[in-house]
Structure formats: structure tokens, C-alpha cells
């Protein structure tokens, strides 16, 4: 059974395509409970693109505890206006999970994002800040059998060195709540 994650991003009424597909899955190796998965998500409009590629690894340590790692790359661009730009960002995430019941698991994790640069159509570029996140996740449902609903609370802190916000010499914190649904088919 292949797991496919579908995320719908609502940012314009003219959304043309959302495509999520597993590129590669491997189970086995030195531990038969370990799973590798490589996925790609593409959203396309005329003049706007957003692509996310991720490599995930999940290892079941015992019946109730698992450990997950994710490496991802986000590439996005806007070409339909004078302020057109292109941005590429990288992210590493580690999330240990505890299975509370057959239909509920909790996770507490850490992520680091390297946002790289944003390049503008005019030729200028801007170095973006690195963010560090702490996350708490609750997953409801059985992800392997039918589908699951995940509620994730994340707090990301950004530093203020060598960027657009450097003159203010202040860091900032972003707190967010994410709701996602993953279905198996």
C-alpha cells in the first residue's frame, strides 16, 4: 500500500493543479520496520509555481515509539508581475512519536529551515534567515489503514543577522497551527 499525502494550498481562485505523488518507497534493510519515502508536491498556475520535494524516514523503535526524519526542498517562483522572484528553501525535521492508543499518537519534534536566497527579476537577491522550530503534533486515525488527521502546533524563531531585518537588530517568533489530512489509496 502506498501512502499519498495531498495538501491543498488556497491562495488564488485560479488554482490549476495540485499533484502529490510518491517518487520512491523502500521498506526493509537492517530493520524491517524502517520506511523510506520520497514525495513530490507541485502546484502550478500561469506564471506561478510551487514545488516541494521531501525524503522521509520512519523507524519503529518498539510497539509504541517511532522516530521520523524528513529532509525537504521547496522551490517557488512568481513570474507574472514586475516584482517576480524565485526562492529555494531547505528544511530538516526530526519527530519522535508515542502511540497513545491505536488511533492517537503524539509527537514532539524539532526542525531547522535554511531559507537560502530570494532572487528578484530585476537581478537583486536577498539572503533569508534560518528558522528553528519546536513542534507538538497530535495524529488521529490510523495512517497505514485508511487515513489520519494531524494537528500540529509549531513555534519558529528567526534571528536578525545579515538580512532585511538587520537594521532593527531584532529577532522574531512565528507561532502557527497546522491542520492536515492524509489518506491512503
Image (spheres, rainbow, N blue to C red):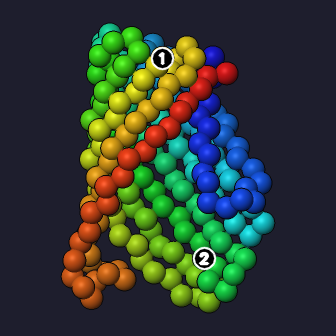
Q: Secondary structure at mark 1?
A: loop
On screen, residue 90 versus residue 78, left or right, reads left
**Residue 95: quarter of image:** top left
Which class describes the residues within 10 Å of circle 1: few (<14), some (14-19), or many (20+)? some
- Residue at the spot 65% in from the left edge and 72% down from the top edge: 78
Residue 161 image offset from top left, x and y in percent? 26, 77
Say if residue 111 shows up in the picture: no
Residue 115 image offset from top left, x and y in percent? 43, 65
- Residue at the spot 28% in from the left edge and 52% down from the top edge: 155
Say if residue 9 shows up in the picture: yes
Front residue (pair 60, 4): 4
Q: Which residue is mark 2?
A: 85
- Residue at the spot 37% in from the left edge and 40% down from the top edge: 152
**Distance from label 1 to label 2 (Cα)?**
40 Å
Sequence-earlier tag: 1 or 2 = 2
On screen, residue 112 versus residue 47, left or right, reads left
Q: Residue furthest front?
A: 13
- Does residue 74 sit above or below 27 in this rendering? below
Q: Secondary structure at mark 2?
A: strand
On screen, residue 139 versus residue 110, left or right, reads right
Residue 59 image offset from top left, x and y in percent? 38, 23
Give me the disc on residue 142. 1
Residue 167 image offset from top left, x and y in percent? 27, 88
Amino acid at each position: 500500500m502506498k501512502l499519498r499525502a495531498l495538501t491543498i494550498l488556497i491562495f488564488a481562485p485560479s488554482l490549476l493543479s495540485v499533484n502529490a505523488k510518491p517518487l520512491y518507497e523502500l521498506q526493509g534493510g537492517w530493520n524491517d520496520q524502517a520506511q523510506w519515502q520520497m514525495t513530490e508536491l507541485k502546484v502550478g498556475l500561469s506564471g506561478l509555481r510551487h514545488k516541494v520535494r521531501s525524503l522521509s524516514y520512519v523507524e519503529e523503535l518498539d510497539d509504541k515509539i517511532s522516530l521520523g526524519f524528513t529532509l525537504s526542498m521547496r522551490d517557488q517562483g512568481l513570474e507574472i508581475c514586475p516584482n517576480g522572484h524565485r526562492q529555494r528553501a531547505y528544511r530538516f525535521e526530526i519527530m519522535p512519536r508515542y502511540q497513545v492508543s491505536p488511533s492517537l499518537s503524539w509527537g514532539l519534534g524539532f526542525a531547522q529551515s535554511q531559507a537560502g536566497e530570494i532572487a528578484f527579476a530585476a537581478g537583486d537577491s536577498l539572503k533569508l534567515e534560518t528558522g528553528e522550530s519546536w513542534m507538538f503534533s497530535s495524529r488521529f486515525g490510523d495512517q497505514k489503514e485508511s487515513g489520519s488527521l494531524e494537528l500540529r502546533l509549531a513555534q519558529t524563531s528567526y534571528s536578525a543577522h545579515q538580512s532585511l531585518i538587520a537594521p532593527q537588530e531584532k529577532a522574531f517568533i512565528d507561532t502557527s497551527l497546522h491542520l492536515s489530512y492524509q489518506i491512503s489509496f
